[in-house]
Amino acid sequence: MPVQSHRPPEQDRGSTVSMTSTVTGLPERYRPLDQVGPDEQTETGVIQTWRAKDRILNRDVAVRVHTPAGPAAHAWITRALTAGGLATPALAMVYDASEGSGDPQSPGGAAYVVNEWIDGVPLSERLAEGPLPEREVRTVLRRLADGVAEAHRVGLAVGGLTPENVVLRPNGLVGLRGVPAASGTIDGDVAALGALLEVCLTGLRPGEAEPRPLHGPSDLVALARRARSTEPGQALSSVAAMAAILAERPRGRTATGGGRDRSEHQRADRHRLDGQRIDHPGADGHAAEAPVRLSPDTLPPVPPLRPPGSGDTVIAPVASAGDTVDARSVVPTGGAYAGSRAEPSDDFAFEPLPGDLYTGPPTGSAGPDDEEDGARRHRLLVVGLPLLALLVVIGLAWWVGTSLLSVAGSVDEGSTPSISVPTAGASGEDDAPAGPSTSIQGAEVFDPEGDGQPENDGDVPLTYDGDPATTWSTVTYRGSAAFGNLKSGLGIVYDLGSAQSLAGVTVTTPRPGATVEIRTADSPAGNLDGFDPAVSGTLEETTDLRFDEPVEARYVLLWITGLVEDGDGFVGEIGEVTVQAAG
């Protein structure tokens, strides 16, 4: 197979010959471009990694070639086929794999695994600049641990967890190249993640003495040591446990100023409660005295009253005699009860307040005219307020009746009132702007509440083949449009290959009337809660379900919640699904 070398012309010709001889036997579909990384020596041979071009899908891929081919590569290819069933953004997807015939001169004679090509900055280059910030450490390790845990759930040890293979993607995600490695163990993956956590905390500085002192948040330091420990009772149980710990919010710190933690503030509070002296300067520059603690039986002191003086308000003696005030000694200044009190004793005498603060009579009771005025005002309030409320009610009733008669008259004359109801998912000015359609890499039926029976799974690719006339449909349900009351819904999960900014989904169907939801996720999920709802609506022949704002996601779930009546029951049918990128 002719191979075009993309190396500069000043390099020697031996490298081109090496490239040609190494990749001989690959299918014509993959055109090698450059070798990536050093050779990987294994117990069964040598693995070389090449960046290549997939001629059919016109995309870059990573092709790893095992020499020799044939039975020597059988174990590695078997592990690669297991990895092909994974779909997580943290691990490079496996697109193709072949054990090969061992004949390097014939196409397909080489043993190879084709992986997703991950663009980004290798973690080793980033760590050469120094340790990662705490928040970034937690995010990178948690996402990587989530992906490795998915592989462990199907019994696959990933291997190859080194800073050189971990890539920081431009969109903030993380990915592991070369999945799976030639060999590996589940315990080895746990220890390797612990080593990655350590190096993220210390950085990679060439020439610095080993081992580097491990420092950073105490919970991360303890987690790294547990992951690398081999002592019984100390080692971390699984990668899933590591991911769960990293997902927890850091504890042991509060948002107090001055770098003081909660325990310091608690100790300071105890000092204050114990009545100890706090050696902090007061307002006058001297140390503040500790508060005096009173006995539980001691009543709080009553502050003394100021004696009347120049410019002070004169306090009536009745108000300052003792701790309480005799209500009978206070003269009402007006109203129906003005003057209705017992006569004060000779021990008390009212003094007029200065200015206009007190205008009532100093002693005595109100006259007959005052009593008549108070009674008149009281009757006016009792009678006037209900009448006012009645008038308000009559006015509102008249206004509502007039409005209804006006609307009814307009209907009788042939004009129908127009009411605008926004449709969920319809395109509007506030929706996320749509860009070009994204490429769907794969799809499968999503039926978490089903009984395991297929739902025309083989027809799912017809929903994104570009032809709306070819369709996929559910099986027929009887008794109810809600899937015969057997489950809440059924859907199709579309894999876009990588996380992208999305604006919405367009759905065509030959059977309008079904109700659907569009949900998104960054990683595959086994239940509906793993997908975030984005928009919902009722399907017409062509329906644009636009998001309110762009959504960053790799997986898009078309979740059908209501079916359409057919002659024999209820079904849902999808002709074409198109996912629009954000404009």
Image: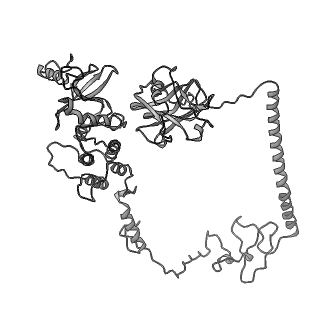
For residue 38, say whether it is visible. Answer: no
Give coordinates of residue 22: x percent, y percent: 17, 25
Q: Compared with residue 116, is residue 528 higher up or lower down, i.e. above or below? A: below
Q: Compared with residue 6, is residue 187 higher up or lower down, i.e. above or below? A: below
Q: Quadrant of the N terminus?
A: top left
Q: Residue at x 86, y 57 (%)?
A: 383
Q: Residue at x 25, y 26 (%)?
A: 51
Give coordinates of residue 546: x percent, y percent: 52, 30
For residue 187, say whether it is visible. Answer: yes
Q: Compared with residue 419, is residue 107 higher up or lower down, i.e. above or below? A: above
Q: Residue at x 21, y 16 (%)?
A: 2
In this view, which residue lies farthest toward the top?
A: 2
In this view, which residue lies farthest toward the bottom?
A: 346
Tally of numbered tags: 0
Which quadrant of the figure has residue 477? top right
Colour approach in the figure: one colour
Give coordinates of residue 97: x percent, y percent: 28, 29
Which quadrant of the figure has residue 537? top right
Q: Quadrant of the C terminus?
A: top left
Horizontal relation, residue 314 to residue 510: left or right? right
Horizontal relation, residue 242 to residue 330: left or right? left
- Of residues 38 and 105, the one nearer the viewer is 105
- Of residues 332 and 26, the one nearer the viewer is 26
- Of residues 157 and 371, the one nearer the viewer is 157
- Of residues 113 and 537, the one nearer the viewer is 113
Give coordinates of residue 135: x percent, y percent: 34, 46
